[in-house]
Image: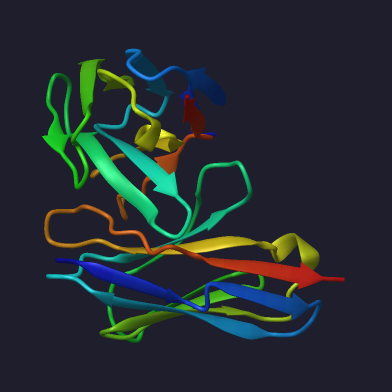
Amino acid sequence: DVKVTQSSRYLVKRTGEKVFLECVQDMDHENMFWYRQDPGLGLRLIYFSYDVKMKEKGDIPEGYSVSREKKERFSLILESASTNQTSMYLCASSSPSLGGNEQFFGPGTRLTVL
Amino acid sequence: EDQVTQSPEALRLQEGESSSLNCSYTVSGLRGLFWYRQDPGKGPEFLFTLYSAGEEKEKERLKATLTKKESFLHITAPKPEDSATYLCAPRSNDYKLSFGAGTTVTVRA
């Protein structure tokens, strides 16, 4: 069964802290994605990666960075957390070699920045 | 810029009362339209991919259809376990998904 895991379900941080969100997939997928989800706005793409050590900006990259040192792991970094980064963060993975290239999502991390 | 609008925002149904959800989209070069189901506090779960106008896909009580500008998700004789938020996401030329805000469906027994 395909699986995407995220390091924390709930996280509370203070303004200005550096925050790391980890995502691991066990499906050998090439593509990995980070989204944030806010009420009424849907999922918005922050960053994605098509290969190890490769990254591309999504629609809302400001205030975030990412790291992909291994194929199965994709990390999202909030350099200096701010209250407007309070949100649900979702990681996903996909493979272009799998028919429809559908994305499989992790359970999400609900981050609160105080 | 890609745009996706889902309607209605919320839908309350009685068990067995069939209905449809709408997803209107404007994307440059559609490379598939994806439907997902999301339960509260969980990540989205993949349901269907549609690629061309006229295509239909079915899964249990759900049927998705696609036209050039819209997709519909039909729920036939829904049960309480069909309660969830349903998300549509067209994929554009650069293979990014653009998600709608979703339709939250509540089915009462």
Q: Position of residue A46 (x, y in %)?
A: 25, 39
Task: Judge from the rendering whether residue B86 lies leftward or rightward of residue A53; answer left or right.
Answer: right
Residue B59 position by quadrant: bottom right
Question: Which quarter of the rendering shows the N terminus of chain B?
Answer: bottom left
Residue at 63% across, 48% down: B40
The reply to whether residue B8 is visible in this rendering is yes
Most distant residue in the right direction:
B109
- Classify A22 as above or below B67: above
- Classify B28 as above or below A52: below
- Classify A83 as above or below B33: above
The residue closer to the viewer here, B76 or B86, is: B86
Q: Position of residue A51 (x, y in %)?
A: 16, 27
Residue at 31% across, 70% down: B4
The reply to whether residue A98 is visible in this rendering is no
Task: Judge from the rendering whether residue B102 lies leftward or rightward of residue A75; answer left or right.
Answer: right
Q: Position of residue B96 (x, y in %)?
A: 22, 52
Q: Position of residue A103 (x, y in %)?
A: 37, 46
Task: Judge from the rendering whether residue B94 lies leftward or rightward of residue A72; answer left or right.
Answer: left
- Classify B94 as above or below B14: above
Residue A21 position by quadrant: top left
Residue at 58% across, 42% down: B42
Residue B55 position by quadrant: bottom left
The residue closer to the viewer here, A27 or A61, is: A61
Question: Which quarter of the rendering shows the C terminus of chain B?
Answer: bottom right
